[in-house]
Image (spheres, rainbow, N blue to C red):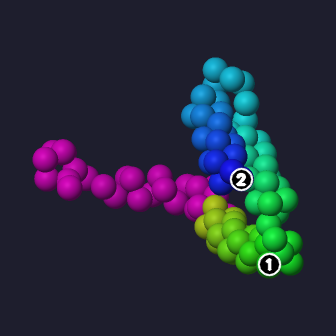
C-alpha cells in the first residue's frame, strides 16, 4: 500500500514540475517537497528506521557530491564568461556552410 502512495506522490510531483508555469510553482520547490514526502512515507512504513536512516544518508552523500561538482563546474564557466572566454572561441570559428560544420 505504501508503494502505491509513494508512486502517487512522485507522479503528482512530476506533474507539478511539468506544469510549473500554469501552476506558478517553482520546480525546485516541487521537487524538494516531493522528495521529502516520498522519504517520509518510506520511513513511516519501514520496519527498521535505522536501516532507512542509513539509506537516506547514503543517498544524501551521493547528491551532495553531484552538487559540489556542479558548483565547481558552474564557477569555472562563470569565470570564463566574465573574461569573455566564450566570445574569443566563437570569433575563431569561421564556418560559412552549416553542412560542413558537424
Q: Position of 13 compared to 54: left or right?
A: left
Please tell me how crowded label 2 is: few (under 14), some (14-19), or many (20+) other residues with Cα within 10 Å: few
Residue appearing at x 82%, y 56% in the figure = 40
Give the residue at x 20% y 53%: 101
Q: Residue furthest top?
A: 22
> Which residue corresponds to mark 1?
51
Residue 21 placement: quadrant:
top right
Please give the name of the residue rendered at 45% of the width and 57% of the height, measured from the top-left corner: 88
Q: Earlier in the sequence, mark 1 or mark 2?
A: 2
Q: Position of residue 46 (x, y in %)?
A: 79, 66
Residue 60 in sight in this render? yes
Residue 84 falls within the magenta-colored stretch = yes
Mark 2 residue element = helix
Figure check: 37 above or below 88? above
The dominant secondary structure in magenta is: helix
Residue 71, horizontal then vertical, whole percent: 69, 65
Pinpoint residue 91: horizontal percent, then vertical percent. 37, 53
Marks 1 and 2 sit apart, C-alpha to C-alpha, by: 17 Å
- Is residue 63 one of those drawn in magenta? no
- Residue with the most extreme front position: 1
| Residue 42 falls left or right of residue 89 | right
Front-lying residue, 40 or 97: 40
Q: Is residue 32 visible?
A: no
Q: Are marks 1 and 2 in contact (CB under 8 Å)?
A: no
In the image, 6 versus 45, the foreground residue is 45
Q: Nearer the viewer, residue 57 or 100?
A: 57
What residue is pinned by disc 2?
A: 2
Residue 93 lies left or right of residue 5; in this view the side is: left
Q: Position of residue 33 (x, y in %)?
A: 78, 45
Looking at the picture, does residue 46 appear above or below residue 21? below
* 101 over 27 or under it: above or below: below
Instruction: Give the extent of the magenta segment.
Output: 75-102
Amino acid at each position: 500500500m505504501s508503494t502505491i502512495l509513494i508512486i502517487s506522490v512522485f507522479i503528482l510531483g512530476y506533474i507539478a514540475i511539468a506544469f510549473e508555469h500554469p501552476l506558478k510553482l517553482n520546480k525546485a520547490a516541487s521537487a524538494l517537497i516531493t522528495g521529502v514526502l516520498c522519504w517520509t512515507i518510506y520511513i513511516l512504513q519501514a520496519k527498521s528506521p535505522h536501516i532507512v536512516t542509513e539509506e537516506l544518508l547514503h543517498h544524501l552523500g551521493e547528491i551532495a557530491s553531484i552538487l559540489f561538482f556542479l558548483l565547481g563546474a558552474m564557477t569555472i564557466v562563470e569565470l570564463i564568461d566574465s573574461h569573455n572566454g566564450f566570445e574569443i572561441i566563437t570569433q575563431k570559428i569561421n564556418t560559412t556552410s552549416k553542412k560542413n560544420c558537424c
